[in-house]
Image: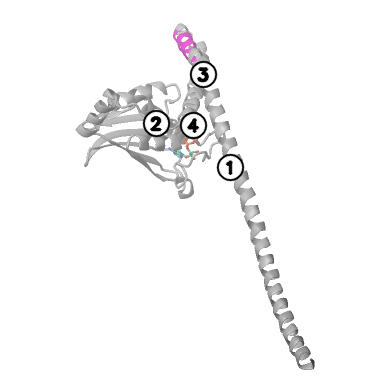
Amino acid sequence: MEVNESIDKAFLNRAFRDFEKSSQKLEQQYAMLSDRFGSLEREFSGKNRAVQRTSRLAAMGEMAAKIAHEIRNPLGSILIFSTLLCRELSGQDENQRLAGHILDSVRNLDRILSDMLVFSNGPAPALEVIDIKDVIEKTLETCSGRCGDNVDIICSYNGETELSADAGLLSQLFLNLFFNAFDAIGTDRGSIKISTHIKAENTLEIIIEDTGCGMDESIEDRVFDPFFTTRHSGTGLGLAIVASIATAHGGGITCTSEQGKGTRFVLSLPCGAEAKEESGMAQSR
Ligand SMILES: Nc1ncnc2c1ncn2[C@@H]1O[C@H](COP(=O)(O)OP(=O)(O)O)[C@@H](O)[C@H]1O
Ligand SMILES: [Mg+2]
């Protein structure tokens, strides 16, 4: 009876120690699990907030695109009537100058709206065979009111200038580059050189160089980022859209600049028989 009792005691002591060890382990594991649960819960609610933010932004983008679309129609009428008014006022220099301000401001608003629409929908080029020379000349005409006497514009077109592209989108691309160049030159004397040539491998290169204020490296690195601007009333959408239009055409654009000297953009677009054939196929589809 005594022997059995001592065996039972030793057995019970061991069992009790084992039980204590196991329960300590369980407590540690429980603490680890509740830590992990806490961090997962935080991660989840963070992700949930990000999803909500993204869908709010998407809804805002959609609303902005709708508003831009609605504003465009009345703006188009204002553009037509202020163009007519400018013509009517020929011979009355001062009045014509004032009406010219309306026209420039409306064109500027129209450009910002077009940028917003392309940014929210993404550029979808409708390809056809076009002459880049015509697009550049027409775009320069459109912004002639903005270009003062202090800026010389020098164009040189070398070799083939036909390619398969969307003339409207390319005009929007050039408008952004020209307006940036006018801003960079300001009221100083300066020039904008536009030249085209064929590069090897069916690429049409268009170089746009200005003698404006230029920029330092930290700005140059970010110019194509959406919403990056150093201008008081800038949107920072211009060059982001320029880059997306170039890419949507299967091309690209680069920027090099020197502060105080000027800036050079090199736009590359596919050209040649293959690109033209593709536009023919796109049209017949
Ligand atoms: N030709 C240029 N010369 C100097 N700086 C430029 C030029 N083009 C663009 N930049 C710089 O890049 C920034 C972004 O340009 P952009 O995307 O067109 O937006 P925004 O014109 O609304 O500022 C400008 O604010 C300016 O700092
Ligand atoms: Mg701009």
Give the Cα distance between marks 3 and 4. 29 Å
Residue holding disc 4? 120
Q: Residue at x 47, y 32 (%)?
A: 119
Q: Position of residue 280 (x, y in %)?
A: 24, 26
**Identity, as a three-letter code, of the amino acid under mark 1:** Val
What is the CA distance from the residue labelled 1 to the residue labelled 3?
Answer: 44 Å
Residue 210 is left or right of residue 19, and the answer is left
Residue 228 picture location, percent across and down: 51, 41
First in sequence, mark 2 or 4: give its number.
Answer: 4
Q: Residue furthest bottom?
A: 3
Q: Quadrant of residue 21?
A: bottom right
Q: Amino acid at mark 2?
A: Leu
Say if disc 2 is inside 8 Å of ligand 1.
no
Residue occupied by mark 1: 51
Q: CA distance from mark 2 to mark 4?
A: 16 Å
Residue, disc 2: 173
Left or right: residue 159 versus residue 46 is left
Q: Which residue is mark 3?
A: 101
